[in-house]
Image: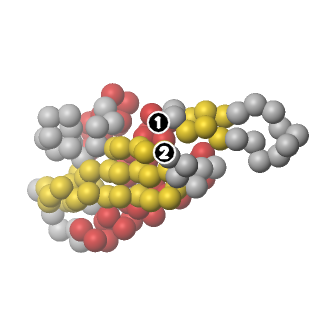
């Protein structure tokens, strides 16, 4: 869970954002990048239709670490015919942009592990 402290001394209270919220944002951002395939809970590749169902049930392919800095790690497969480096860089940029825009939390690092190439 990420806890945000007020920046102004006039604001009282705190805001907490659970990891599943950040995972959902990062997962949705990942799916918007062309050339991505995701593993399911058994390690099989998910079809495009099953991606959204997987996001709501299972975040095993996304890891969130917050110790004063937010670090996000995603495990993906790259579809055949796409450049691995290009896809992974696009994922990094998209996740950082979406999480920072939607939560106001600075993202320190986005790690993308390309586990293989899918057909």
- Classify 10 Å Cα crowding around label 1: few (below 14), some (14-19), many (20 and above): some
SS label for mark 1? helix
Q: Residue at x 45, y 34 (%)?
A: 20
Name the residue nearer the viewer: 78 or 10.
10
Q: Position of residue 4 (x, y in %)?
A: 65, 41
Q: Judge by depth and name the residue closer to the eye, 9 or 78.
A: 9
One can see residue 72 in this view: yes
Against 58, residue 88 (above or below) is below
Q: Do the residues labelled 2 and 1 touch (CB within 8 Å)?
A: yes
Please indicate, yes or no, whether residue 94 appears anywhere in the rendered image.
no
Residue 48 location (% of width, % of height): 26, 44
| Residue carrying label 1 | 19
Quick check: 101 above or below 18? below
Q: Label 2, on which residue?
A: 66
- Label 2, label 1: how many angstroms apart (C-alpha)? 9 Å
Q: Give percent across and percent down for residue 117.
A: 14, 59
Which class describes the residues within 10 Å of circle 2: few (<14), some (14-19), or many (20+)?
some
Could you tell me which quadrant the C terminus lies in? bottom left
In the structure shown, which secondary structural element does the residue marked by tag 2 occupy?
strand
Residue 74's place in the image compared with 40, above or below, is below
Could you say which quadrant of the image residue 114 lies in?
Answer: bottom left
- First in sequence, mark 2 or 1: give its number: 1
Q: Residue at x 21, y 38 (%)?
A: 40
Report whether 19 appears left or right of 62: right
- Residue that protrudes farthest toward the top in the picture: 57
Q: Left or right? Give the position of 40 relative to 54.
A: left
Disc nearest the viewer among 2 and 1: 2
Q: Which residue is drawn at 36% across and 67% down?
A: 89
């Amino acid at each position: 869970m990420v806890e945000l402290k007020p920046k102004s001394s006039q604001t009282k209270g705190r805001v907490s954002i659970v990891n599943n919220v950040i995972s959902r944002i990062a997962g949705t951002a990942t799916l918007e990048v062309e050339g991505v395939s995701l593993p399911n809970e058994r390690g099989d590749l998910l079809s495009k239709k099953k991606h959204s169902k997987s996001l709501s049930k299972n975040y095993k392919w996304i890891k969130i670490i917050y110790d004063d800095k937010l670090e996000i790690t995603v495990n993906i497969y790259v579809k055949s015919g796409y450049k691995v480096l290009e896809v992974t860089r696009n994922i990094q940029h998209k996740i950082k942009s979406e999480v920072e825009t939607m939560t106001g939390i600075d993202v320190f690092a986005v790690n993308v592990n390309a586990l293989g190439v899918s057909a």
